[in-house]
Amino acid sequence: MAEIDTIVAILVATMRAGTPLLFAALGELITEKAGVLNLGIEGMMLVGAVAGFIAMVLTGSPLIGVLAAMAAGMAMSGLFGFLTLTLMANQVATGLALTIFGVGLSAFVGLGYIGNPIQGLPGLAIPVLGDIPVLGSLLFNHDPLVYVSLVLLAAVTWFLYRSRAGLILRAVGESHEAAHAIGYSVLKIRYLAVLFGGATSGIAGAYLSLVYTPQWAENMTAGRGWIALALVVFATWRPARVLLGAYLFGGITIMGLHVQAAGFAISSHLVATLPYLATVLVLVLISRDATRIKLNAPAALGKPFHSSG
Amino acid sequence: MQLRLEPRAMPSKWLRYSSPLIALALTLVFGVILFSALGQNPAVALYTFFIRPIGTLYGLSELCIKAAPLLLCAVGLAIGFRGNVWNIGAEGQLTMGAICGGGLALAFYGDEGPWLLPLMIVGGGLGGMAWGAIPAFLKTRFNANEILTSLMLTYVAIQVLGYLVHGPWRDPEGFNFPETRLFGEDALLPVLIEGTRFHFGVVLAVLAAMIGWVFVTRTFAGFQIKVVGQAMAAANYAGYSGNRVVWTGFLIGGGLAGLAGLGEVAGPMGQLNPTISPGYGFAAIIVAFLGRLHPAGVLLASLLMALMYLGGESLQMNLNLPLAITGVFQGTLLFFVLASDVFIRFRVKLVHNVPRTAP
Amino acid sequence: MTSQATNPGPAATPQLELRGIVKQYPGTLANDDIDLTVMPGEVHALLGENGAGKSTLVKIIYGVVQADAGEIHWNGERLNISNPAQARHLGIGMVFQHFNLFDTLTVAENIALCVEDSRDLAKLAEQVSAVSERYGLPIDPRRHVHTLSVGERQRVEIIRCLLQNPKLLIMDEPTSVLTPQEVEVLFQTLRRLAGEGCSILYISHKLDEIKELCERATVLRGGKVTATCDPRRETPKSLAEMMIGSELPVCQNVDGGDRGEVCLEVDGLSLPADDPFGTELTEIHLNIRGGEIVGIAGVAGNGQKELLQALSGEMKATHANDIRIAGTPAGHLPPGHRRGEGLAFVPEERLGRGAVPEMSMSDNTLLTTYQKDMVRSGFIQFDRIDEYCKTVVDDFNVVCAGNHAEARSLSGGNLQKFIIGREILLGPKLLILAHPTWGVDVGAATLIRQAIIDLRNKGTAVLVVSEDLEELFEISDRIAVISNGRLSPARRTGDTDVEEVGRWMAGMFDTAGSGEGHHAA
């Protein structure tokens, strides 16, 4: 029984570690499907994390914390949108700028809150179902944001492939000229997609600072924003595979910790390289199939749009 | 009535050169607002940030030694960025250069001679180059996105450094502090100005910028990089190899970043510790764009960025403001640079049309 | 100015009337005080050469672009058309020259994007089938657009318009992507629509098409209306004079008949497509001797791009011997080495492939001339480049603001003259041109064709890939056709005609004994 408990604990921890990646990657997926490459996830997550944390400290309400994180992420992505969509700045450079700015801004704003402990988000066990042995703890005994992330996954899938708005979004991401010529407002649709990406990145950040390790520390995202970007490529722009990828990476992180806990004499520094090395490996495995990337990647990804006339 | 951006028939030459200055001016305006909001006298704060740090010869020399690693990294990055080679892992290549060069200093500790420093310089450059070669290989062989791989490898390099200084390379007499022993005299870059820390690495950096200048403006290899960056299809048509540009960009970028790392550990630090760089490799991205991806512009931009580092320290010491302000300023400056660039190719026009209704 | 006498009866109110339309772009006045009247059920031609302002005008009608001044009257009522959705709502449909379709979406999804209330894709598919049957435009709504031929894509665009029961259908250069036989079918569809009362605004620069199809024509030149007429009563010569202000210039094509060495041999070239949307090349055979021009006709998307890339070296052939340039096996050589063997190349895309848009003329000279002593031990010889650039500009009448002008600031015709001049002055043994006069004004087109003929007469082997049959018949010594990745035998131009080439374009030929003069059908 103890072994099963350990395995369940590892799986639950995996889901927790994967959840921020899932949030951020779903947002980026929508952004990229609209044809915009936002490399600033890391920056948006950090600003979301610090905003959520401060709001939580000030109000004591986790809900307000999460909402503040969303708003902060959206503000950051709105800035990105203004530069890349309205002013047509280079998306790669602006995304990098957003990350650099986010790192600095969050460190600056969060200075007074380092080491400030808070009560993390309480768990939300679903009655009855949560009491089922094994399955109950695995599926029905999480913090609320885990459920939200799964609902969001379903919603994004439905939106992209079953709704008219999703069809329009994909059309804009494939050819903004054609979408513009038949009368869609490319900029408006892209702004909405970028803002959505900012909101989910903000939640992803809040998950780290309110749930995963309930505290604020500079640079606490530790590259998760970049891993989320890699996940979108790994998933070849399909939502279900984002889930797989997010939990896979969550698992790698957790495994490393458990290997150490099990008494293997491996430096924690070397263990910490695992998710990054895994990301590189996954990118290599997926990217070598150029045809698959080409069939799935939004054709207008990263290209600036200016409507003449 | 609404504002619209309208393409110019010809890009504005005047704005091409003045837009970084406009961006700088806007950043200063932002600074005034920020400092006022923090309850500081903006004039005093800006003076403390921008002028006070370089009021003395020592201050100027500090500016130069801070600018040197930025300049080295940014010249390499700018060459790559011109060819759309998005190496954003300069921080990792810098770290690897420091590890390799510094490792040589430790390996030959107590057994050194005048040959050691040149060996370390070569070792540092090659270390950075090797770390840069990985994303280049993955890009050209497997088409893996170089932005993500080079960045992931940065995190790996920093962890490797952490492992080394916490573990095998820790100073045996260092009271368990995570740092190596201090390098011997022959493993240090010579100081060129008495009474300051102005070392030979600064000369190397300026030399790199000058060679970079000739490379991008006068050589066919530099021209090919520019064509690949601006129009890949035209490069294919003309017979220029995109893969070769990826390799060139990463080897030059990695090599120069490696030199920058070596310059830090064999210069002001004289040892390896877990934080050899306050983010020079990332700030160099800003420097490269601010300098218009041109080595001459990069030279000026690296001085400005170095001043921001000193300014942050100066604010912390004199006005008790947080060091993180530097990051905010750097990010803001890059935003303004990117935003003002649009006006080189577009102009703002007021249109009186009936507003378009959404479909 | 416009007479309505040709349209007697109760329909006295014009379907569409434009008055004094003006549109200014930076540097050009695209539309200068344009009047246009289209009656219900009328097939109205908008005639003009490239750059005359036709596209801008129809974009204004369709709401993509807003006019700076002028009035639009629809069915007698003055209104503003502020976006395409509104235009569609009014009953204006448009088939674009460059289709506005999405490759990775299905036909039904593409159509749904233009039909406002289309929640139910299954029901929409039914409507699509009904319309396509009624007008003889067969299409399967479940297919992905990237699997369709160009002709089928045009059908999707037309069906997309017809679903809205349009009162005015705008067709922008619709026949450039069709075989001559498909053009006939399209004209039948259009006549039928007109018979049902739908007005058609037909944009073209092809005089014989307009004479065959249209009842009235408005002729544009330099952004102004130069004439309104009944094209059926005009001659091609008079129409051309209205369109370009003078007679159609003709090339001097005197073929001495001297053929030199074989400069290009393609021997059983087969190549799988590297792009999921591409075409596979199958068993291509082709020989070209010095001093002859071979033309390759075909509908776009039948393997032209792949063949051109295989010849230029941008795509490697399977065997080195599949392609020989001047006797040297070149199938494995990269583009630069093929240039070294005497190949010069003019690609279809001028901006972005043939020239770098944001680089100067000098830099764009260096782009392909680097083997002509323009680079010494790695350093660029700027004075030699400037000299070469100036020679090209002078010899080929390139209008530009000097060696420092950016390539993108040139008009299409001038840029094409520059690129062709740059390649010709390299003194190639073999010159390959893709769509050399596409989108170029008549004056530049004539100069380009003459330059190609003159080069042939100096002994160079020339390969021209084009969709413009008239052009191929005018300059080629032999003509072959590419269809679905296969190449027909090359027939002497005098021994074939548009009819036969049209059948070949539809794939009806036999490559088995690919000798010269071999008859297909």
Image (tube, rainbow, N blue to C red):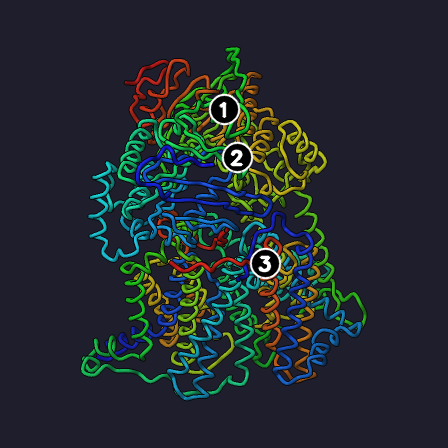
The subunit carrying tag 1 is C
> Which percent across, then down, holds residue B60?
76, 70
**Residue type, label 1:** Ile
The secondary element bearing badge 1 is classed as strand
Judge left or right: residue A5 versus residue C279. left
Q: What is the distance, in whole Å, between disc 2 and disc 3 at their CAs?
A: 30 Å
Q: What is the distance, in whole Å, between disc 1 and disc 3 at their CAs?
A: 52 Å
**Residue type, label 2:** Arg
Label 2 neighbourhood size at 10 Å, few (<14), some (14-19), many (20+)? many
Q: Which is nearer the eye, B42 or A115?
A: B42
Q: Do the residues labelled 2 and 1 touch (CB within 8 Å)?
A: no
**Tag in front: 1 or 3:** 3
Please name the residue that numbered disc 3 is placed on. Answer: B348
> Which percent across, then down, holds residue C149?
32, 37
User: Which circle marks residue C325 in the picture?
Assistant: 1
Is the residue B2 above or below the residue B7 in the image? below
**Tag in front: 2 or 3:** 2
Which callout, 2 or 1, points at the residue further toward the start of the chain? Answer: 2
Please name the residue that numbered disc 2 is placed on. Answer: C221
The secondary element bearing badge 3 is classed as strand
Is the residue B144 above or below the residue C35 in the image? below
Label 1 neighbourhood size at 10 Å, few (<14), some (14-19), many (20+)? many
Labels 2 and 3 within one chain: no
So how many labels did they put on this image?
3
Q: Are marks 2 and 3 in contact (CB under 8 Å)?
A: no
> Which percent across, then down, holds residue B263?
67, 64
**Residue type, label 3:** Val
Judge left or right: residue B110 versus residue C63. right
Is the residue C37 above or below the residue B111 in the image? above
